[in-house]
Amino acid sequence: MIIMNAGTIQNLLKNQYGMTVVFDNQGSLLYISQNGEEELGYQQQNTNIRQICKPMFPQDMDIESRVEKINGREVHTVVYRSNGTCFSALLRCARVLVKEDVSVNVAAIYNLQKTEDAIVQLVKAESQIKASIKSRNEFVANVTHELRTPVNGIKGHILNLIEQEEDSEHKKVMDIVLNCCCNMEKIISNMLDFSKIEAGKFEITEAPFDIRQCVKNVVDTSITIANGKGITLSSYVSDDIPKTLIGDDLRIGQILNNLVSNAVKFTSIGYVRIEVYRTMQKNHQVELTFFVIDTGIGVTPAEKEKMFKSFSQVDGSVTRQFGGTGLGLYVCKQLIDLMHGTIDLESEKGKGSTFRFTLLLDMDDDSGEEHEELEKITLVDELRAQIQNTQDTVDVEKLYQFGSKENMTEIGRNVERLTLCIEMGNWEKAEQFAANLKKLCEGAPKELVNKIFRMQMSVRKENYDRVFRD
């Protein structure tokens, strides 16, 4: 039996979160809360607890002994309304001494039906969402598969026409169409991979491969576009990396291709470089760390947070200027996760970016190479310092510091390319190199800055004679 003061009993009877009923040992209702009246449809008069809680208080059971047996515990039961409908409920019941030799039974009833209905709706909604995602992924997979055929057909015909065409103007147009086809292929591949990853059907295969050949293939893929933009694309693979490794060279190449093509897209001055180092070796496994470094537009810390999310770019202006779906980096991260690696980004707005990812790969026992059973961890910065003399990269700070050796060299390269573009009548490319010169000459004497501005305007107007005078 529970002894309560008047204030506690009053708070209990209010029961804001459920229904409260008070009844005597014969089961007659002495009190029912407002919530109870509204929910159950019973009034206090001529109502018995046996009508409300039939399973808990059947006709042949002593009320007092039943309450003592429950003794304040929570019990799941079924509660009946006055109209004959019922619902699942949680019941807590106890005897309360209100004054000497006078006690009543108090029951608190909580309707579980709304909670159970909400759970059913949640499960139903979850099922519908999964079905919707499945349909979407199947649709994307089918569409991207169907798109490959016409794109490959256009690409094949354009390649044949380029080989046969002699007119330089026609070849120029065909090169643009071919470039569009290549871009479309990349978008289709990323969308197909995205749908496979989302559906959980993406598989990583393992086979012997040559990491140096893999990197070379990536460079060969983007070297033409890089050279066309006037930037340097190079690579370095550390000598201590075994010739043959076990892994998915197709997916590793895809990751590098995505990162390099992005770097080339967002870089107009300087270079893009791939570097690969061995950072750990243990028994028959080796950890490789890959760097893709560029001197491009860079990103702010706030923009960095968006980089690896699907369909995300740093802002709308980037999408308008450079294009793309925002899937490339998302696919890269998912592929690296599937291979149990990690990826991160170091970047500063206007000063380039460095993507770094690590992969743990098996060494090929059939390659004839001897492997030491050891664990070797070397700081990446130390490894990079060891080959500093072999790098053809430049300090980004010096690149944009007017008058430095690196700055003057880059200005000379851009002037040469600008001149060549003007002679060939490629004014679109010429405008790009004129913009590069303007950026490289920030901080120069005002007279020189004004001359470059006038030259840039002449390029936009395609004024051959005025450009050369400037």
Image (cartoon, rainbow, N blue to C red):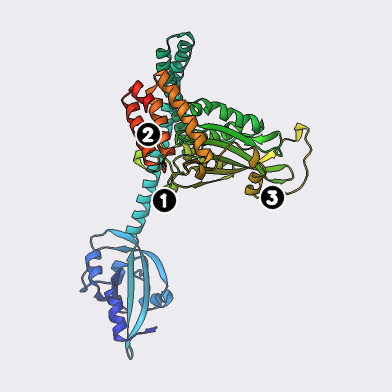
Q: Earlier in the sequence, mark 3 or mark 2?
A: 3
Amino acid found under the numbered disc labelled 1 = Ala
Image quarter of the C terminus: top left
* Label 3 crowd bin: few (<14), some (14–19), many (20+), radius 10 Å: few
Image quarter of the N terminus: bottom left
Residue 108 visible in this rendered orientation of the protein: yes
Q: Quadrant of residue 392?
A: top right
Q: Where in the figure is residue 3, as x and y percent of width and height?
A: 37, 85
Residue identifier under label 3: 377
Q: Quadrant of residue 460?
A: top left
Amino acid found under the numbered disc labelled 3 = Ile
Residue identifier under label 1: 302
Question: In the rendered view, would you say 107 is above or below 366?
Answer: below
Residue 452, which numbered label?
Answer: 2
Residue 185 visible in this rendered orientation of the protein: no
Q: Where in the figure is residue 51, as x and y percent of width and height?
A: 28, 67
| SS category of the residue bearing label 1 | helix
